[in-house]
Amino acid sequence: MLSFEEGFIESQQLNQRLLQTIRLLGEYKGKQELFKQQAPQVLGTLRQAAVIQSTEFSNRIEGITVPLKRIKKLVTEKTTPRDRSEQEIAGYRDVLTTIHTNYNHIPFSTGVILQLHRDLYQFAVNTGGRWKTVDKEISATYPDGTKVVRFQPTPAYGTPAAMERLACKNGLIASGNRAR
């Protein structure tokens, strides 16, 4: 979470490629608004595909694998989950729906994050809505047995304070004043 620390972003060097990417983002945002007006059904289809892919890959990182056909049913038809993996996918589906439909009215605060986490586990045996108590890591294990740590999240003991700092630094968002 170094990228959320004071001064981290400002200390990064800007090269020509990054500046070009930032310029293109602004250009594409304008095109997106026009596209939303001219072809909303196409955008809806693309959003649906993105939600399904996000659900599949985000859950795969956590070691949850469900066949793509079943993920599609869980996401698009609100099918009842059959097992623990599907329970987690159904929770993820509902949290994404909440965020997509209400993002303009959701303040960025630790309370909201914990509420979304609780909702994430609404179908599961595990209870959500509290900070982690065990350290975790994002790793990959290769066929030869080699394990590589891809990302080391903030330790469990430091998570509440880190999240509070993050929410405070985003006070502009937390107060409801969103930059557009």
Image: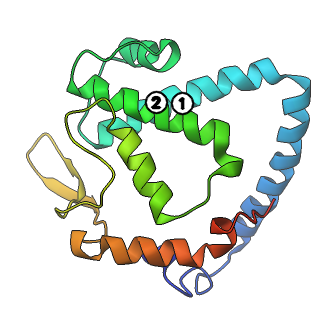
Q: Earlier in the sequence, mark 1 or mark 2?
A: 1
Quarter the N terminus occupies: bottom left
Can you tell which mark lies on residue 93? 2
Is 157 in front, or is 47? Answer: 157
- Dividing the picture into quadrants, the one containing residue 36 is top right
Question: SS class of the residue under badge 2?
Answer: helix
Query: Image check: 135 left or right of 115?
Result: left
Residue drawn where x is 30% and y is 26% of the image: 87
Vertical comparison of 74 with 125: above or below = above
Residue drawn where x is 14% and y is 54% of the image: 147
Can you tell which mark lies on residue 79? none
Residue drawn where x is 65% and y is 47% of the image: 103
Query: Disc 1 vs disc 2: Cβ atoms closer than 8 Å?
Result: yes
Is 74 in front, or is 121? Answer: 121
Query: Image check: 8 left or right of 22?
Result: left
Q: Amino acid at mark 1?
A: Val
Task: Point out residue 168 in the picture as x, y percentages from the top left corner.
Answer: 55, 77
* Mark 1 lies on residue: 51
Query: Image check: 12 left or right of 64?
Result: right
Task: Point out residue 72 in the picture as x, y percentages from the top left corner.
Answer: 45, 16
Task: Point out residue 90 in the picture as x, y percentages from the top left corner.
Answer: 38, 26
Vertical comparison of 7 with 51: above or below = below
Is 52 in front, or is 127? Answer: 127
- The label nearer to you, 1 versus 2, is 2
Residue drawn where x is 35% and y is 14% of the image: 80
Q: Amino acid at mark 2?
A: Arg
Badge 2 crowding class, 10 Å Cα cut-off, few under 14, some 14 to 19, many 20 or more, is many
